[in-house]
Every structure is written in C-alpha cells, then in structure tokens.
Amino acid sequence: MPWAFNRDYKDLTQVADFWPDYLAVYGELACDGRYPYNDSFKGRIPGIEGPGEVTAIYLLQQTRSLRNMELKVERHRDDGWRDFDPGEVARGPVRYAGVAEYGFCMGGGGFQKWDHPRLTRFHGSVVLLKGRARVNGHLLSGKLLVKDL
C-alpha cells in the first residue's frame, strides 16, 4: 500500500519510515556534488510512490532541515552557549560574546549567529544591536542562545 499523507504538514513523523532511504539518496547526491532538489528524489524512495510522493519528499526535506538546525543548537550548547532569559535585559542593554537565533517553520529551519552584540528591549520585544549601534537593531522573534563574555 503506498504512503498516504495525513494532511498535517507539521507531522514529520509520518515519513520517519522512509528516512534511511532518503538519507541514502541524499548521500549519493552529495557525493556527486549535486544540490538535493525535491525532484532529485522522485522515484528513488520505495514506499512513497504515487500521488503523495512530492509531499513525502517535501516532508523528508523538512526533516533534514530540522535535524540540521537541532544539531547546530546542540553543538553550540556543548560549546558553552545557553538559553537566553529575557529578564536579563530588563534594565537595559547587555553585551554577549555571541547570540544565536534559531527556529523552525514551514520551509525550513533557521540559525543565525552574531559575534559580540548587545541585546536590549524595545516596546516589549528583544532587539539585537551590532557593534556600537544605538538604532536600527535586529528584532529577534525566534529562540535564542547566548554565549557569555
């Protein structure tokens, strides 16, 4: 019986059984120096053939993106980074050795890092200020890791 989409794009577990086959194809593409476009997987992963194949490939690509983001977060925590507590900037700007913002949404996981920024609050939101800037900060909306000075 072919794979059937459960109509929930956030449920990545529905393609977990196909992960090993996906990784094998991904490894082949990487060895050949080819970019892993969704079409590169068509007809190459047993069990997802049929009308839902494109969706299954999309969910597998999302799984890879999520796992890569989680791996970056784990590596940073192992390197001494910690979760940010918004209360730390209640009294004004605080300088850190590094700040990383991460999050996952449809379309992929994101991870962005800045060296030696300051974090502050502006109208209840956390804002990152680079260098000596006092204005034109970067509004942070994801989860944050910080590395203390």
Image (tube, grey):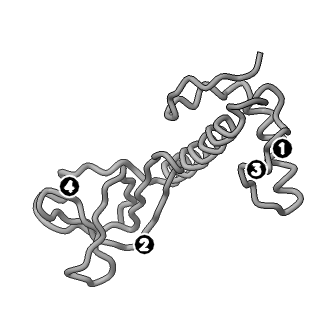
Residue 112 vs residue 124: left or right?
Answer: right
Task: Name the one closer to the observer, 48 or 116.
Answer: 48
Element at label 2: strand
Give the position of the C terminus as an image quadrant.
bottom left
Q: Nearer the viewer, mark 1 or mark 4?
A: 1
Q: Earlier in the sequence, mark 3 or mark 1?
A: 1
Q: Earlier in the sequence, mark 2 or mark 1?
A: 1
Residue 139 occupies quadrant: bottom left
Q: CA distance from mark 2 to mark 1?
A: 36 Å
Q: Which mark is residue 39?
A: 3
Residue 29: x %, y % from top left? 84, 54
Q: CA distance from mark 3 to mark 1?
A: 12 Å
Q: Quick one: label 2, few (<14), some, or many (20+) residues within 10 Å?
A: some
Q: Which residue is mark 2?
A: 115
Label pair 2/3, CB-CB below 8 angstroms: no
Q: CA distance from mark 1 to mark 4?
A: 45 Å
Q: Quick one: label 4, few (<14), some, or many (20+) residues within 10 Å?
A: few
Q: Which mark is residue 25?
A: 1
Residue 75: x %, y % from top left? 56, 50
Q: Which residue is mark 4?
A: 88
Residue type at the position of mark 4: Glu
Q: Earlier in the sequence, mark 4 or mark 2?
A: 4
Element at label 4: helix
Label pair 1/4, CB-CB below 8 angstroms: no
